[in-house]
Image (cartoon, rainbow, N blue to C red):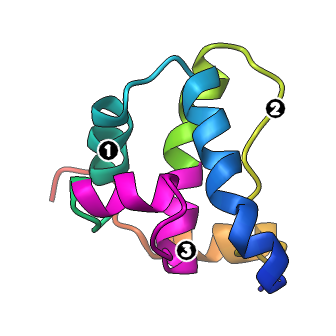
Amino acid sequence: MAESSPADDSARHELFEAARRGAGWTLEQLWIHYLALGGSLVFFDLDAYLAGLTPMQPSQQDVLACALNERLADLHHTTRVPYLTALSNTDEGALANLLEQLPDVGSSD
């Protein structure tokens, strides 16, 4: 997991707000997409975070980053909001093992 310094945390809300504007979203549109991805903040708490008034849990920042990054990708922007949690490298063997455990979709038992 990537760690961020308190100085980074204090300005991170500005990064999110700039990305929201760059994505052409209203705060309401961002909140709806954030909720759709599993975000748990109420509208007013998200508004307060983007204004720099309240903190946001790192896991919720990653959900917010995902919502914004999906929109930026749809608009073909090259910039993305960085995630706080780094994913470990996945092993293709692990994926193959998982797929072997799944029942055959096309089989008629």
Position of the C terminus, as image quadrant, is: bottom left
Percent position (x, y) of residue 105? Answer: 31, 50
Do we see residue 88 in this rendering? yes
Q: Does dot 2 land on a helix, a strand or a loop?
A: loop
Q: Marks 3 and 2, how far apart in space?
A: 33 Å
Q: Marks 3 and 1, how far apart in space?
A: 34 Å
Tell me which corner region of the image, top left, top right, bottom left or bottom right, holds residue 82: bottom right
Type of the residue with mark 2: Thr
Percent position (x, y) of residue 107? Answer: 27, 51
Q: Which residues are magenta?
A: 44-65
Residue 48 in magenta?
yes
- Kindly identify which numbered label has been placed on residue 31: 1
Residue 103 in magenta?
no
Q: Which is nearer the eye, 64 or 27?
A: 27
Mark 2, residue position: 79
- Kindly identify which numbered label has been placed on residue 81: none
- Kindly identify which numbered label has been placed on residue 98: 3
Type of the residue with mark 3: Leu
Q: Does dot 3 land on a helix, a strand or a loop?
A: helix
Q: Which is nearer the eye, 26 or 74?
A: 26
Q: Earlier in the sequence, mark 3 or mark 1?
A: 1
Percent position (x, y) of residue 108? Answer: 18, 50
Q: Residue at x 75, y 19 (%)?
A: 77
Between marks 3 and 2 in the image, the one whose residue lies nearer the viewer = 2
Is the residue marked by circle 1 packed among few (<14), some (14-19), or many (20+) residues within 10 Å?
many
Position of the N terminus, as image quadrant, is: bottom right
Between marks 3 and 1 in the image, the one whose residue lies nearer the viewer = 1
Q: Looking at the picture, does residue 11 appear above or below residue 33?
A: below
Is the residue marked by circle 3 packed among few (<14), some (14-19), or many (20+) residues within 10 Å?
few
Q: Which is nearer the eye, 98 or 9?
A: 9
Q: Which is nearer the eye, 42 or 102?
A: 42
Relative placement, left or right, of 79 versus 85 is right
